Image (cartoon, grey):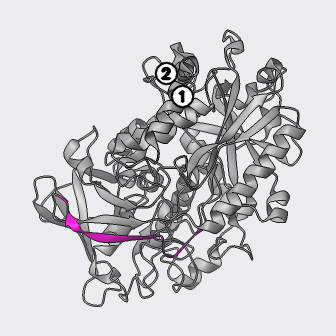
């Protein structure tokens, strides 16, 4: 397709991450033309990546955390996925859990909770998405994967879900080849959408303004646009476009950029095993393969208990650690870590003395820090982390481990004041950079502390050992995240435009031909699960809708509601 100042197509998909690629792949073979625009290139590109520069203002995140977790490249952030386990060491994966029914439900005690579509409606799309992405059906039942050496733990209300994993190269390589071979799909890389032109009244997108890496501009005219730029970039494009200024046709209630959430990932605590035999009972919870599929067990409370105790959702994995982990020396060392980032630390000399008062413990602590690289991770026991498995293999000497690290992903409540906005600084293409204010509410903090207490009781009653809590929200050991890996919200889905940006079909309220794909449409953070499978499921559903409208089988919003 020509890259002249005026490019014409039927459907323009903006962004070639998992969301945009899913829409484009599902539309292969349709009777209409599809153009995919990607800001990055097929390989890493420093100039393209610099466009992700942004600022995050939060007491729990580094200022660069939002930019550092984004990838402007064909395949999107799939290029940054890291899950890997023995015997592979080069093919990387992402977790593919579905949301739980409780994640979609409105909660009387949580403002802004609930999805306008539920798990029953998304179920078939989850299955389609998983088969397309991973080649397997969705199955989180532990009984599917048990063997004599991998049995689920019995811990009362703390149960087990099996996380499945799917490969990154489904998006970074396979999608590239499929789209290249498609007769009706074209891809243009190195093309950044700066703004959407809403014409005279702003109720229909007329064209997209696109800037190449060299600064030259052209326009894409289309019947329909699917904005799939990324979890935060979707808001950036809308806020940079006239129809989406506060009060505009696509943002009458000033919701664009609001309700942003994340999945904070942190150490909940550590388990001091009651006996060395405990580690032999945890094989199900290590990353491992069953019939060629990577899986591992995730600990989470049963749904009725979450409802009863009004708990936000958390999911935990356990990883064995060597002596020194979770010790006084390690706490002292971690409390000094802010000095590396130029931040002040209270009583640094006292903390340094604590660290050095026991040289052997300090040396053990240094060995627990992850200093490995992907090239040698399987050769060093120090390298076992929440995203690198293999420690439960029969040939590994588990007597070297003395502690179990409990690593969690936690749910955040939607908060309208967690807002993306356009800052004063501009990037190399002249676009205003993003700024995010993100707080972690005190009610969420208290809720997570209650979950931590319940978790400790379940572990100790189940006979695994003593649970030593770690999590605090103040002082030198409070969480401080270097990456915001699961941004959600910003263009949230809600039937009422007063509370959301897109409707249940992912169409922007007040705009006839603009849809949004990606985690930015999530009304809530969907518990603790990685968002990509839900992104792919929603994008598959959206592709069906786009095909229906383009073919004329769906003609207006009333028909859309009847068919959905």
> Of label 1 and label 2, which has the lower sequence position?
1
Q: In this view, does 362 lie to the left or right of 456?
A: left
Q: Nearer the viewer, residue 153 or 221?
A: 153
Which residue in the structure is indicated by mark 1?
84
- How many neighbours does mark 2 have within 10 angstroms: few (below 14), some (14-19), or many (20 or more)? some
Q: How far apart are marks 1 and 2 (CA)?
A: 6 Å
Residue 526, horizontal then vertical, whole percent:
63, 59
Which residue in the structure is indicated by mark 2?
89
Magenta range: 413-427
**Residue 387 included in the magenta stretch of the image:** no
**Which residue is rendered at x = 39% and y = 36% of the image?**
173
Q: From where the camera sits, is residue 119 visible?
A: no
Residues marked 1 and 2 touching at CB (< 8 Å): yes
Looking at the rendering, which quadrant does residue 249 occupy?
bottom left
Looking at the rendering, which quadrant does residue 326 occupy?
top right
Residue 38, horizontal then vertical, whole percent:
29, 53
Q: Nearer the viewer, residue 449 or 90?
A: 449
């Amino acid at each position: 397709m020509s890259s002249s100042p005026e490019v014409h197509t039927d459907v323009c998909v903006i962004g070639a991450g998992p969301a945009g690629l899913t829409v484009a792949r599902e539309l292969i073979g349709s009777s209409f033309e599809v153009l995919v625009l990607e800001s990055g290139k097929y390989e890493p590109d420093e100039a393209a990546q610099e466009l992700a520069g942004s600022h995050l203002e939060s007491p729990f995140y580094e200022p660069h955390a939002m930019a550092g977790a984004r990838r402007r490249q064909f395949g999107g952030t799939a290029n940054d996925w890291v899950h890997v386990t023995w015997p592979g060491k080069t093919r990387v994966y992402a977790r593919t859990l579905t949301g739980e029914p409780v994640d979609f439900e409105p909660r009387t005690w949580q403002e802004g909770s609930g999805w306008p579509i539920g798990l029953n409606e998304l179920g078939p799309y989850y299955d389609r998405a998983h088969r397309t992405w991973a080649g397997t059906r969705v199955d989180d039942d532990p009984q599917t994967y048990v063997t004599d050496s991998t049995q689920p733990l019995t811990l009362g209300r703390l149960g087990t879900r099996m996380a499945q994993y799917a490969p990154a190269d489904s998006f970074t390589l396979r999608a590239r080849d499929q789209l290249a071979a498609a007769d009706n799909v074209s891809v243009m890389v190195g093309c950044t959408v700066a703004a959407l032109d809403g014409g005279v009244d702003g109720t229909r997108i007329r064209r997209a303004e696109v800037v190449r890496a060299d600064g030259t501009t052209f326009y894409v005219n289309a019947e329909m646009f699917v904005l799939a730029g990324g979890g935060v970039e979707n808001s950036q494009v809308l806020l940079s476009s006239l129809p989406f200024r506060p009060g505009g046709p696509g943002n009458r209630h000033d919701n664009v950029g609001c309700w942003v959430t994340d999945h904070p990932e942190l150490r909940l605590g550590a388990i001091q095993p009651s006996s060395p035999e405990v580690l032999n009972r945890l094989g199900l919870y290590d990353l491992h393969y069953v019939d060629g599929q990577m899986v591992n067990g995730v600990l989470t409370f049963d749904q009725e208990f979450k409802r009863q105790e009004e708990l936000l959702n958390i999911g935990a994995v356990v990883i064995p650690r060597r002596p020194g982990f979770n010790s006084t020396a390690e706490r002292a060392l971690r409390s000094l870590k802010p000095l590396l980032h130029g931040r002040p630390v209270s009583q640094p000399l006292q903390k340094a003395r604590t660290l050095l008062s026991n040289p052997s413990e300090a040396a053990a602590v240094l060995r627990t820090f992850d200093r490995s690289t992907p090239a040698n991770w399987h050769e060093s026991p120090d390298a076992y982390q929440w995203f690198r498995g293999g420690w439960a293999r029969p040939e590994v000497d588990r007597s070297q481990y003395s502690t179990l690290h409990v690593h969690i992903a936690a749910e955040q409540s939607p908060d309208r004041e967690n807002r993306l906005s356009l800052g004063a600084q501009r990037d190399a293409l002249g676009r205003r950079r993003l700024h995010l204010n993100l707080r972690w509410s005190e009610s969420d903090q208290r809720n997570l502390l209650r979950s931590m207490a319940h978790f400790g009781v379940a572990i100790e009653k189940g006979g695994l050992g003593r649970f030593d809590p770690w999590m605090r929200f103040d002082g030198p050991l409070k969480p401080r995240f270097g990456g915001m890996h699961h941004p959600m919200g910003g263009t949230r889905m809600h039937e009422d435009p007063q509370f959301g940006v897109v409707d249940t079909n992912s169409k922007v309220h007040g705009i006839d031909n603009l849809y949004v794909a990606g985690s930015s449409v999530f009304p809530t953070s969907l518990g603790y699960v990685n968002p990509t499978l839900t992104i792919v499921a929603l994008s598959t559903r959206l592709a069906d809708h786009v095909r229906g409208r383009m073919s004329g089988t769906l003609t207006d919003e009333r028909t859309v509601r009847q068919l959905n």
